[in-house]
Image (spheres, rainbow, N blue to C red):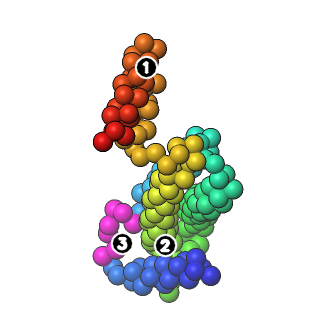
Amino acid sequence: MKTLLKIISLFVLSVIISFKPSILNTCIISYDFVLNSLISLFSVSLAIVAIFFTVLDRYKENIVNREHFLRDTNAILKEMAENSLGLFILIIILFIESLFHNLLSSIQLLNIPIIILIFCLSMSLLIVFDIAFSILILINKLNDFTDVNDDNFGLTQDERKIIELIRKLDKQSRDELKEYLKALFIKQNMK
């Protein structure tokens, strides 16, 4: 219902804007510009979805609560797929408008080709905003999931860095570090 309300609002706004005569002289409201923009945005949205799958696949390996992870990320991926589909539908609308341009231009009451161009452009901007917002939500979710991983035993970022550095030490240096840590622990307990 919310999406339908947005679409109707944008269409009404497009009709109102189309009555402004100066809108006809802008290079932004042209078939070539809008079609190129939509195709570019559609390509980018598909690339973003593909990147999302790659990133999510990597995170999924380190997540303990996979059910929670899949539930949250699937909602975001579904929204991204809907956005990509919306851009594709706008491209189809422009294609159909180009096929029937002469017929649509003959209607005197409304400048339907301009209304369609304004609608497609404004709708694509709304979809791009939604894609950007989905990216932000996904990044926040991924940050939340990295803190949930039980394999870290509640380690802080500094503790994780220390463990990574220890793993890079050779065997002799690791043994020396173990002995030093044992001595440091004994010294601390004696205080």
- Which-is-in-front pick, marks 2 and 3? 2
Please tell me which residue is depicted at 62% across the width and 55% down the height of the picture.
69
Please tell me which residue is depicted at 46% across the width and 14% down the height of the picture.
171
- Give the side of residue 184 with respect to residue 44, left or right: left
User: As rendered, which of 106 and 50 lies closer to the eye?
Assistant: 50
Q: CA distance from mark 2 to mark 3?
A: 14 Å
Q: Which residues are magenta?
A: 22-29
Badge 1: residue crowd in 10 Å (few <14, some 14–19, many ≥20): some
| Residue ID for mark 3 | 24
Specify the farthest residue to the right: 67
Please tell me which residue is depicted at 34% across the width and 62% down the height of the picture.
27
Q: CA distance from mark 3 to mark 1?
A: 73 Å
**Which tag, 2 or 3, sits closer to the chain's start?**
3
Specify the farthest residue to the front: 190
Q: Position of residue 47 (x, y in %)?
A: 53, 45
User: As rendered, which of 106 and 29 lies closer to the eye?
Assistant: 29
**Which tag, 1 or 2, sits closer to the chain's start?**
2
Q: Quadrant of residue 55?
A: top right
Q: Quadrant of residue 76?
A: bottom right
Q: Position of residue 155 (x, y in %)?
A: 46, 45
**Which tag, 3 or 1, sits closer to the chain's start?**
3
Question: Quadrant location of the C terminus?
Answer: top left
Q: Residue 119: which numbered mark, if any?
A: 2
Q: Secondary structure at mark 1?
A: helix
Q: Position of residue 15 (x, y in %)?
A: 46, 82
Amino acid type of the residue tagged 2 in the rendering: Phe
- Which-is-in-front pick, marks 1 and 2? 1
| Residue ID for mark 1 | 174
Q: Position of residue 186 (x, y in %)?
A: 38, 33
User: As rendered, which of 32 and 66 lies closer to the eye?
Assistant: 66
